[in-house]
């Protein structure tokens, strides 16, 4: 169990105090996989550094299995750190050691006899699917294989928590999928609690049970994936169910319609949307199944004069309707993921809309079913 209570981190710089974490409260239950997403500068890396106590929090508690690591003196902290395994974006292996020796290294440092450490390393390499590559050196392994060695090494000291900081951003999508499957397998077989920091919503879609959106050092939305995707119009719902690009040149009023197949059949919604009259057309849409919820999100264009009638008709049918590209509330508004930090003139928690496709540059979502008309 990971528990953060009122976690705060300030950095004192020549230009003044920078508040990187502004009171984070978060509880990740045992054996869950929790994602942390947020725009650049949101505080993700600081959060992970505070979790490992590489960075001392200014205030607050960092509890792993009930023990507040932030309150421990340095010497005790060193021995408690074995509870936390770390997987980084760029795995940092010793080039002059074999894969097996790299995995055995943390055990050797803790004084484990060579034979015992070697046997454990072999076991772990087997777990990550590299049983036959123990004698290979990092230069003889692919990027994905090196990341597997990194995961095996992170597991060597039998941690109860695995922290993954952008574990797949240096990998292609096929390899990313394999690494995520491995993280999921490790989570299920060893019962590890996993925290994944990522800027890729596709990573959250594939492995996370729950997710938090961080912006300007605060959690602005957090919860199980099923709840987030059905909180229609919220920043995380919009990121988790991204819309494919709509045709250029659409000039009318844009409305966004969301629903869950638990409440509506896709066929009925499509029939309703196509029967709204000649001045209304479906621009783009996505159907996605996440955490057992099949959620649909459509953007329709309609003549300005028809907006009240169209909204009335859709709402009367029980569908969720908002003006497209508008965040649900002013407070929910955060920058698109990933993206530059909001400009200094933008007030906190009102830093622009999250909307459109969630992958960089509007690239197709590998999991979603884009249905642009
Ligand atoms: N050592 C430091 N000294 C001063 N300010 C810092 C320090 N480390 C981080 N910050 C500031 O804290 C804020 C959060 O930074 P952090 O690196 O945690 O963001 P991030 O979410 O990881 O961003 P990215 O996605 O770009 O990696 C930023 O405003 C950053 O400039
Ligand atoms: Mg970072």
Image: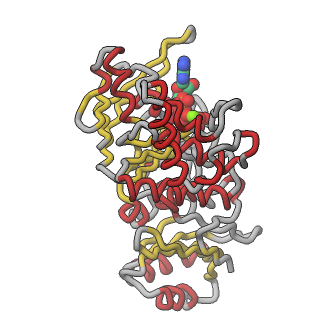
The N terminus: image quadrant: top left
Q: Is residue 139 above or below residue 294?
A: above
Q: Quadrant of ligand 1?
A: top right
Q: Is residue 149 above or below residue 112?
A: below
* Residue 341 image-quadrant placement: top right
> Closer to the camera, 21 or 94?
94
**Drawn side of residue 324 relative to residue 293, left or right:** right
Name which residue lies at 39% across and 31% down.
82
> Where residue 221 appears, x then y in whole percent?
40, 49
The extreme left residue here reads 66
Name the spot of residue 320 as percent of width and height, x first: 42, 72
Q: Is residue 357 above or below residue 159?
A: below
Q: Is residue 212 above or below residue 175?
A: above
Query: Total of numbered circles in the picture?
Result: 0
Which residue is at 29% across, 38% downward? 3
- Is residue 266 in view? yes
Q: Nearer the viewer, residue 313 or 190?
A: 190
Q: Where residue 190 sits in the image (x, y, percent)? A: 37, 52
Toward the viewer: 35 or 1? 1
Query: Is residue 342 something that shows in the picture?
Result: no
Q: Nearer the viewer, residue 253 or 194?
A: 194
- Left or right: residue 18 versus residue 177 is left
Quadrant of the rendered structure where residue 201 is?
A: bottom right
Q: Say which residue appears at 48% left-offset and 34% top-offset.
A: 216
Does residue 221 appear to the left or right of 127 in the view shown? left
The colour scheme used here is secondary structure
Q: Residue at x 76, y 68 (%)?
A: 248
Q: Quadrant of the C terminus?
A: bottom right
Q: Position of residue 115 (x, y in %)?
A: 48, 36
């Amino acid at each position: 169990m990971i528990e953060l209570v009122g976690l705060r981190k300030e950095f004192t710089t020549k230009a003044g105090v920078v508040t990187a974490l502004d009171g984070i409260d978060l509880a990740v239950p045992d054996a869950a996989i929790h994602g942390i997403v947020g725009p650049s500068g949101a505080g993700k890396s600081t959060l992970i550094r505070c979790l490992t106590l590489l960075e001392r929090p200014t205030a607050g508690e960092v509890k792993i299995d009930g023990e507040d690591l932030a309150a421990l003196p340095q010497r005790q902290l060193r021995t408690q750190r074995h509870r936390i395994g770390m997987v980084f974006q760029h795995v940092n292996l010793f080039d002059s050691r074999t894969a097996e020796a790299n995995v055995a290294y943390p055990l050797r440092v803790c004084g484990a006899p060579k034979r015992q450490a070697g046997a454990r390393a072999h076991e772990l390499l087997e777990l990550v699917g590299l049983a036959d590559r123990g004698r290979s050196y990092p230069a003889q392994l692919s990027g994905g294989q090196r990341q597997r060695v990194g995961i095996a090494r992170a597991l060597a000291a039998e941690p109860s928590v695995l922290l993954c900081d952008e574990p797949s951003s240096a990998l292609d999508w096929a390899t990313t999928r394999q690494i995520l499957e491995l993280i999921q397998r490790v989570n299920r077989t060893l019962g590890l609690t996993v925290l994944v920091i990522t800027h890729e919503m596709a990573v959250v879609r594939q492995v996370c049970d729950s997710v938090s959106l961080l912006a300007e050092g605060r959690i602005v939305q957090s919860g199980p994936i099923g709840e987030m995707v059905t909180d229609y119009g919220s920043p995380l719902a919009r990121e988790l169910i991204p819309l494919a690009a709509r045709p250029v040149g659409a000039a009318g009023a844009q409305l966004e319609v969301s629903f869950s197949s638990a409440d509506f059949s896709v066929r009925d919604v499509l029939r309703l949307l196509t029967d709204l009259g000649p001045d209304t057309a479906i621009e783009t849409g996505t159907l996605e199944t996440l955490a057992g919820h099949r959620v649909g999100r459509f953007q329709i264009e309609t003549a300005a004069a028809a907006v009240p009638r169209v909204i009335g008709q859709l709402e009367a049918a029980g569908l969720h309707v908002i003006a497209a590209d508008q965040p649900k509330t002013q407070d929910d508004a955060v920058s698109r993921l990933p993206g530059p930090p909001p400009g200094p003139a933008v007030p906190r928690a009102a830093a622009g809309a999250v909307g459109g496709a969630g992958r960089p540059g509007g690239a197709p979502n590998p999991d979603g079913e884009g249905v642009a008309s």
